Image (tube, rainbow, N blue to C red):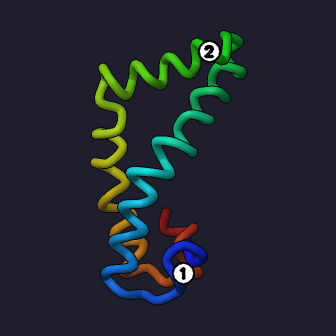
Amino acid sequence: FPLLFGTQHSLWTSFQEVIFDNFVSAPLAWLPPAYLIKAVLYDYPLQEGLQKYVDDVTKNGLLQKYWTVWVPAQSISFTVVPDHLRVVFM
């Protein structure tokens, strides 16, 4: 996220990147399209795909499970792993 947070590799910048990606990007931009793609692949209505996303978030703890994996992984990625190796690490 260099356009949003700059290219500095400080703990503060890394913290901002992790928080933004996990609490803004993923719930609003990455996870809903995954549910829409799944709806298309499994041939059920897009509205049902979005409803499954909402149900997983509100009833099945989707975001808590997501954060359990990705907050630690991205914390390591954004603080320790060199930029050119991040894709390989993830």
User: In what element is the residue under mark 1?
Assistant: helix
From the image, tell me which residue sits under label 2.
47
Report the residue at 49% width, 77% height from top: 5
Say which amino acid is labelled 2.
Gln
Report the residue at 32% width, 48% height from top: 67
For residue 39, above or below residue 87: above
Q: In terms of sequence position, does the residue under pointer 2 or pointer 1 come before the other? A: 2
Say which amino acid is labelled 1.
Asp
From the image, tell me which residue sits under label 1.
83
From the viewer's perspective, tell me whether residue 69 is left or right of residue 87. Answer: left
Report the residue at 52% width, 83% height from top: 6
- The image shows residue 60 at horizontal and vertical percentages of 31, 23
Viewer-nearest residue: 45 or 80:
45
Q: Quadrant of the N terminus?
A: bottom right
- The image shows residue 55 at horizontal and vertical percentages of 40, 19
Distance of mark 2 from mark 1, alpha carbons? 38 Å
Front of the two marks 2 and 1: 2
For residue 67, above or below residue 61: below
Q: Toward which corner of the image does residue 14 lie, by quadrant?
A: bottom left
For residue 34, above or below residue 21: above
